[in-house]
Image (spheres, rainbow, N blue to C red):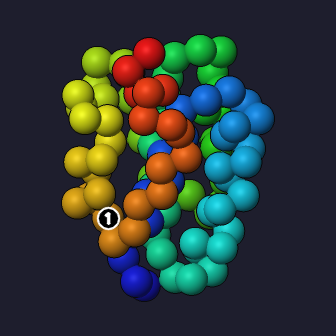
Amino acid sequence: MKGWAAVCRFGGVGDNLVAASTLRPLKKLGYNVEVITTKKGSNTHTVFLNNPFIDKLSLKDDGEIPGGGLETGRNRGDTFSRRSPPDAWNR
């Protein structure tokens, strides 16, 4: 294993489906994959449930997102993929 890859996406179902398309290639490259997404909305995180290419699913509330967004999360993994515009974190 190469280590951890983090994919972060806060959006609707369609946005999460697009972000999910990156999971298989990351897994194929040998990464453990963490998906970071939001709890708010109409349970759009359900797109990621039971996905065999996800090792860890992290659901965040608005208050749990650091002021600078998840840029600080880059230190958590070996590779980090932000799939949301920075302003989406502070809405």
31 left or right of 75 in image: right
Quarter of the image with the C terminus is top left
User: What amino acid is found at the position of numbered circle 1 in the picture?
Assistant: Gly
Residue at 40% in and 83% down: 2
Residue at 41% in and 60% down: 80
User: Where residue 50 sits in the image (x, y, percent)?
Assistant: 66, 48
Mark 1 residue crowding within 10 angstroms, few (<14) / some (14–19) / many (20+):
some
User: Where residue 74 sits in the image (x, y, percent)?
Assistant: 29, 57
Please say if 54 is above or below 89: below
* Residue 57, visible in the rendered structure: no
Please say if 61 is above or below 26: above
Identify the image quadrant of residue 69: top left
Quarter of the image with the N terminus is bottom left
* Residue 37, visible in the rendered structure: yes
Please say if 21 is above or below 40: below
* Element on which disc 1 rests: loop
User: Where residue 33 sits in the image (x, y, percent)?
Assistant: 49, 63
Q: Between residues 10 and 28, which one lies in front from this camera angle?
A: 10
Residue at 23% in and 28% down: 67
> How many badges with numbers are in the image?
1
Identify the image quadrant of residue 89: top left
User: Where residue 13 sits in the image (x, y, percent)?
Assistant: 73, 31
Label 1: which residue?
A: 77
74 left or right of 44 in image: left
Please say if 35 is above or below 75: above
